[in-house]
Amino acid sequence: MHVFAIAALHLLQFLAVIPMLLSYQIALPGCTDKCGNTSIPYPFGIGDERCFREGFKLVCDTAYDPPKLFMNSPGYEVHKIKLKRRVLHLDTGITYMLGSNSYKVSWSVSLDGKLFRVSADMNVFIILGCGFQFFISPPAAGDSTSSTCVSACHTGYPVLETDGTCSGIGCCNTSVVEDHNSYMIKLVSLSERSSSLSSPNAPPFNASMVVVKGEWWRRADNAMLLQQEVLSRLSGPAGVQENVGVRTVKLSDFGCLSDNNINECMLPNPPPCFGKCINTVGSYEYICPGGTSGNARIPNGCVSGKLKFSGFMVAIGLGGSIVILLLILASVVVRRKLKFRRAKKLKEFFFKQNRGLLLLQLVDKDIAERMIFSLDELENATNNFNESRKLGGGGHGTVYKGILSDQRVVAIKKSRYAIKREIDGFINEVAILSQVNHRNVVKLFRCCLETEVPLLVYEFIPNGTLHEHLHVNSAQSLPWKERLRIALEIARSLVYLHSAASVSIIHRDIKTTNILLDDRLIAKVSDFGASRGIPIDKTTLTTTIQGTFGYLDPEYYRTSRLTEKSDVYSFGVILVELITRKRPTSYISSEGFNLIEQFILLIGEDRFCEIVDTQVTEEGGEEEAREVAVIAVMCLNLKGEDRPTMWQVEVKLEGLQSAVNTVRSDQITPRHAVQLNYPSNEQNDSNIIAVSDAGYHNSSRRLSMEEEFWSSMSFPR
């Protein structure tokens, strides 16, 4: 009988060896790893004791050709060892049983039950014979746990169906439900089962039990081989009687109980072969004779020479590779073209949209055509807007340094947000700056309309902002003389914007961070995104509030009415910042006043020295600073109509600038009076706030602010 002996799963000793061996499946160094055609992986071994573990000793019998492998005790033949599945294929022969009414015997495989057990799910018990019911159960188990099958005969011979299954006529099969090394086997005569009394004349039965691999048994060819062998053993010269016993036959004679025990090449009618048949374990294969290669199962399948690709196959493979490569390249090219086309269409769309918006705001249509840069040129100028080219940024955009193809250094302003308000602001800035040409206004070279929000290209101003120079973290800042000159330059630019340009332009966001300084500290007014143009026939414009708190005109904030006087107020805040060197957006006095409130209060109480920058006093510019303070207070009047125009402020500052350039010892500084409701001429002395100069208390000269201001008009511009 041939069975599958499976290693017991619950034993740690065997399991501890197996994981290590699954990777190698070889014998230990210096140990024999093969016996005949059977490999011997560790922990199995032959010969020296170090070559195997206890319980895994095997014996190689070289008397056979080829040699055969056997268990050390008992001497079952080992056909195959599968460590990965932890399975042994053993040949244990055929069990022969003979009885009349019933037969009961214990059947076992004589192996160490701690290491090996018969596999219940991999073996099938085949019973050949007639007239009985077969029972098999684990030891000490009752009939309730038995597996059973019935076999009867009509002709007196075992019969197998040609599809390879036992039909119950001459043969039946069953399996066991548990892995064990021994089982109780019981055969009961069918005549005894049908009668309550045993019949002494009941015909005897005979049976042969074979244990085979389940998947092997289900193959029809192997089942037929078993049938032929049994029938041939039962045949005789005078026929066969039902009670003649079956002879005990070694399992290897059947050739059906092992993967390598059938030599298909020696069958009477082997499958067609056009080469050489090679028997293998459990199967066979055909190979071409030496010096040839190909398919030995078909006529002319073996061809001379080694297996090679023909020129045609090579051409197909090479051609297929080229086609695949071309398809990949084509997909890359098409993808790039589609991406380029999409980008081009977007550029065209944005250009048409932004150009239309720009033309709506420009009187001279030719200006728009002359001011356009391509996006490619600006990307090249900024190295694709590299972070290393970033100069800074404000609330509306980021400024990059660029170098044009003609080597001009420019500043390129790029919006952070693609929203309509930003687009309108950038278009508005282009429209305004395209009509402006003044030395104290930053120059707009061109713009790019191929992005959703236009890119603006300015002249490059390398020296930062007035705010940065004024509020340095040191005791010394800009000299007073430079501050006064910068204030005059800002005033000149605002006068130009308010009156000299083609339309009256209100900046609406005058502050020190929007005043750029070049390498000679020349002031340049920038950032016209919030600016608005007012037609000549109008003086006010109602619009949404926009600007920076601290510099924002309170009247404009309350009424939304934008006038030139809104810029005058913001300029007054800058004058205060130049005098005090304090930040209007963050200064809070101990009494809770902001910078402008505190400044006006101290000027009115003749406490100018408490708020003026000490550097101004140290440089001897206190007198000019007092006069600038007077102008600042007038610019900061809460009523816009009572503020001076920027032209009037410019004239006064020019006078002060001229005085600074004269010998200071020749100057006589009068006592000043600040008229808060300028320029009304009907105010009495009760509306005058005296501002005394502590250094000139004994001066007898008194002039109203109005008189002094208008007298300054005689200074040349």
Image (cartoon, rainbow, N blue to C red):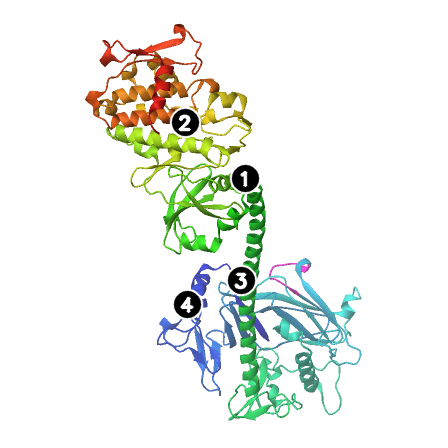
- Tags 4 and 2 touching, CB below 8 Å: no
Q: Amino acid at mark 1?
A: Asp
Q: Residue at x 24, y 30 (%)?
A: 476
**278 over 192 or under it: above or below:** below
Q: Amino acid at mark 4?
A: Glu
As helix, strand or loop, the secondary structure at mark 3 comes to helix
Q: Nearer the viewer, mark 4 or mark 3?
A: 3
Q: Amino acid at mark 2?
A: Trp
**x and y, in percent, of residue 486 in the image:** 33, 32
Q: Nearer the viewer, mark 4 or mark 1?
A: 1
- Disc 4 target residue: 54
- First along the sequence among labels 1 and 2: 1
Q: Residue at x 36, y 23 (%)?
A: 713
Kindly report the distance in space between the C-alpha atoms of the residues bearing marks 2 and 3.
58 Å
Q: Nearer the viewer, mark 2 or mark 3?
A: 2
Asked which quadrant contains residue 268, the reply is: bottom right
Q: Amino acid at mark 3?
A: Arg
- Disc 2 target residue: 647
Q: Quadrant of the C terminus?
A: top left
Kindly report the distance in space between the C-alpha atoms of the residues bearing marks 1 and 3.
33 Å
Q: Nearer the viewer, mark 1 or mark 3?
A: 1
Using the image, tell me which numbered label, if any, was put on residue 424.
1
Using the image, tell me which numbered label, if any, was put on residue 336.
3
Residue 684 among those drawn in magenta? no
Asked which quadrant contains residue 665, the reply is: top left
As helix, strand or loop, the secondary structure at mark 1 comes to helix
Kindly report the distance in space between the C-alpha atoms of the residues bearing marks 4 and 1.
92 Å
As helix, strand or loop, the secondary structure at mark 4 comes to loop
**x and y, in percent, of residue 664 in the image:** 21, 23
